[in-house]
Image (cartoon, rainbow, N blue to C red):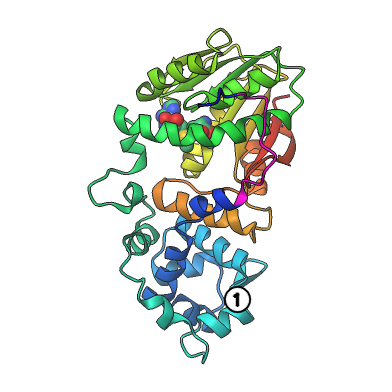
Amino acid sequence: MEATDLRRIPSSDPLRAYRYRDGLYAADLVTAALVHLDFFTWLAANPSDLAAICRHFGFAGRPADVMMTLFCANGFVTREGDVFHLSDSGRDFLLASSPWSLAPYYRSLKDRPVTKDYLKVLSTGKPANWGGYDESADWHRAMEDEAFARQFTAAMDCRGVLMGPAMAQALDLSRFSRLLDIGGGSGIYACSLVANHPKLSATVFDQFSVEKIARTRIAELGYADRVDVRAGDMLKEELPGGYDLHLYSNVLHDWDLPEVRQLLAASFRALAPGGMLLIHDAFIDADKCGPLPVAEYSALLMHSTQGKCYSTAEYEVLATEAGFRGFSFRTTAADRGVMTAGKP
Ligand SMILES: C[S@@+](CC[C@H](N)C(=O)[O-])C[C@H]1O[C@@H](n2cnc3c(N)ncnc32)[C@H](O)[C@@H]1O
């Protein structure tokens, strides 16, 4: 296998290959709403805000929000202020009484495991089992097992070989010297940042089940002299001090609002004054009507984790609450982006 050069980004387009994987579950969420709940017929008669939708169907807020973002991004639904209305295409193709209704076409998919999972996730707010298989634990518990952690971390690592350098090259980090990569997984993003910013050194902070995996991968990439690893629980202990740059890469999207608030507050406390927080993730637009590929990916995260893709506006509000100021956002690669926030 060719050696990995974290300063190189392929010039071909990654989007088609990424989007099948990222968007895989979105069709199951549409099927659950259309076939099991006849959601669109109800919405046509009852334009409603999120709270009223949740009350009527007994939905939890997080999955309902992700579902409505997906429907807006598809143009099935429009949003006027806080109120959702069925759009013309929703009326034509998703309303049970329409001559062009596709409900019978989707009906044969109704027993797919992930479609049925969505009914549970919508009503309980809790993630389904990983991959929709009965015998697996949910992702958060599964990650405590080293064999699962190895397989999952390898999956994250292979994305990072593209996304890490793309993020690193989008940023001017010349003011910074010490990076803490929180929930850093294999260390691929920490290695990408130090590879592209020669003054930086880094620590990857992740749970115990991932520690050895990260050390091995960092050594294999050739950065063991500039990237070390520290095991700990980011939700149960203070983050270590002595860092002027923090990274949450694909971490906040695993969690619901209370944990996201907790993690942002922990970062603000531990970061050096004048330091910067990087959030690398897939971001929903501020108006929560797109982009469609991110809304589809959010459906997958909503199914399998306690989180979702947050919007740029949601992150700004949450990070401002934690004390951060001065935000910037830029897109990187494969429908991802990076937000920066400063600690005054
Ligand atoms: C989706 S992965 C992202 C990994 C990497 N940052 C990336 O962008 O590919 C989330 C990471 O958070 C870590 N994590 C989850 N709960 C944690 C906890 N309580 N303390 C520390 N790390 C945790 C997981 O082990 C995992 O490596």
| Residue located at (53% from left, 18% from top) | 221
Q: Which is the main secondary structure of the residues drawn in magenta? A: loop
Relative to 201, residue 342 above or below: below
Q: Note whether 254 is above or below 66 in the view shown.
A: above
Q: Say which residue label 1 marks.
A: 85
- 24 is higher (above) or lower (below) than 269: below
> What amino acid is at disc 1?
His
* Residue plotted at (28% across, 43% down): 137
Q: Residue at x 49, y 14 (%)?
A: 219
Residue 238 in view, yes or no = no
Q: Residue at x 36, y 41 (%)?
A: 139
- Residue 18 in the image: x percent, y percent? 55, 48
Check disc 1 and report its element: helix, strand or loop: strand
Left or right relative to 154: residue 120: left
Residue at the front extreme, as displayed: 1
Residue 118 in the image: state x and y as whole percent. Answer: 38, 61
Q: Does the magenta stretch include residue 232?
A: no
Identify the magenta region: 5-15
Q: Is residue 80 visible?
A: yes
Q: Residues within 10 Å of mark 1 (few under 14, many from 20)?
A: many
| Residue 218 or residue 54, whichever sits in front | 218
Residue 322 is situated, as x and y percent measured from the top left of the image, at 61, 33
Looking at the picture, how far across and down is residue 135, in whole percent? 22, 47
Which part of the image, by quadrant, shows the C terminus? top right
Tell whether 328 sits left or right of 244: right
* Horizontal side of residue 338 vs 203, given as left or right: right
Q: In this view, does 255 lie to the left or right of 133?
A: right
